[in-house]
Amino acid sequence: MSESQPNADAPANTASPEKDPSDWVTGDEPATGAQKSYLETLTRQTDEDVPNDLTKAEASQKIDELKSS
């Protein structure tokens, strides 16, 4: 048997460009359970309250904001 070789035709392992949350097709849907849980974790270290009615896009932007603080 031959050794496994990487496929020369395969694309390089590059990160896909990040899409702005305001451009998401599902951005107006309610935030996911995972987003809500992560926001709760991040806000434990702050005095901020996270509204329960965030959209997916708003939750993503809030997560980015809290992570960069």
Image (cartoon, rainbow, N blue to C red):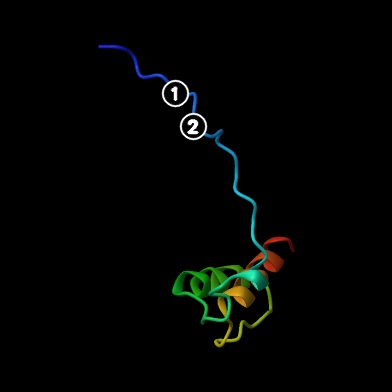
Callout 1 secondary element: loop
Residue 48 pos. (x, y %) = 68, 79
Q: Looking at the rendered structure, which numbered label has been put on residue 6?
A: 1
- Kindly identify the residue that appears in the image at 60 percent across and 44 percent down: 15
- Kindly identify the residue that appears in the image at 57 percent across and 81 percent down: 28
What's the residue type where badge 1 is placed? Pro
- Kindly identify the residue that appears in the image at 71 percent across and 67 percent down: 65
Callout 2 secondary element: loop
Looking at the image, residue 50 sits to the left or right of residue 29; the answer is right
Residue 44 pos. (x, y %) = 60, 72
Residue 7 pos. (x, y %) = 44, 25
Q: Residues within 10 Å of mark 1 (few under 14, many from 20)?
A: few
Front residue of this view, candidates 48 and 55: 55
Q: Which residue is mark 2?
A: 10
Q: Are marks 1 and 2 in contact (CB under 8 Å)?
A: yes
Q: How many marks?
A: 2
- Kindly identify the residue that appears in the image at 52 percent across and 78 percent down: 31
